[in-house]
Amino acid sequence: MIRMEEQARNICIAIGKRIRGIRNEKRMTLDEMAAKTGFAKSYLSQIETLKREPPISTLAKIAYVLGVDVFFLLTGEARDDEDRDFSLVKVPERRIVHRPFGKYGYVYESISYKKANRLMDAFVVTTGFEFPTEPLTHKGQELIYVLEGRQEFFYDGNIYEVGEGDCYCFESNKPHYSRSIGDKPGKVLLVFASEKSDRLG
């Protein structure tokens, strides 16, 4: 368990270093990145120095502002930047990322990473059996379709129980998180997008 936590911590350290390194290469200050992402300067600083664990949706927004792919921030692997009108990701080609600090057993499988200049990001997400310690809040909207299992979804003070085939959409700027319930981890299709003005600005 300690070894797993150390490995997750090292991953997060690398993510923070990559964000800071790219930002410095582009001669972008924290104030400028805060203005472009809509996140507080203090929050971005905490991400760079490993004092806060950012969700993938936050990293996607930061990656967009920095002009890189979110999976480069997560893994350090460069992606082919050729612009494609069409992209196809076969099941074996999915890029799998365990939630940083992996404590809650969240696994993200990217199914949209090949599309350059995309307006949304899509993942197949396997959720753990515990709520995260802090709810998520960020700009944009999310659509979630339950593929397997059952979950409790917390949103803006309410808890909803959802099962296979259920679909829900919501504004991401209100507190939200989920956990699996029952005998097996839940699996969902997650699609999220930033606000239109953020994508076009």
Image (cartoon, helix red, strand yellow):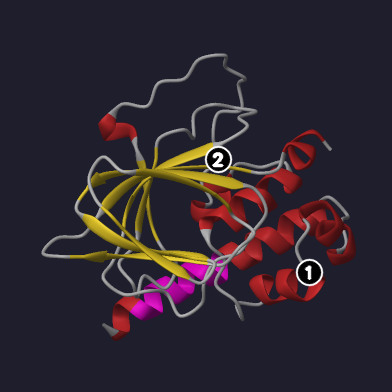
Query: Range of the magenta residues?
Result: 5-14
- For the residue carrying disc 2, how many other residues have a C-alpha within 10 Å: few (<14), some (14-19), or many (20+)? few
**Would residue 115 appear left or right of 31 to someone viewing this image?**
left
Rendered image quadrant of residue 30: bottom right
* Above or below 164: residue 97: below
CA gap between label 1 and label 2 equals 28 Å
* Above or below 196: residue 134: below
Rendered image quadrant of residue 200: top right
Q: Which mark is residue 40?
A: 1
The quarter in which the C terminus is drawn is top right
Q: Amino acid at mark 2?
A: Ala
Q: Amino acid at mark 1?
A: Ala
Q: Which mark is residue 78?
A: 2
Residue 6 pos. (x, y %): 39, 80
Instruction: Choose the circle earlier in sequence order: 1 or 2.
Output: 1
Q: What residue is rendered at 28% in x and 66% in y?
A: 128
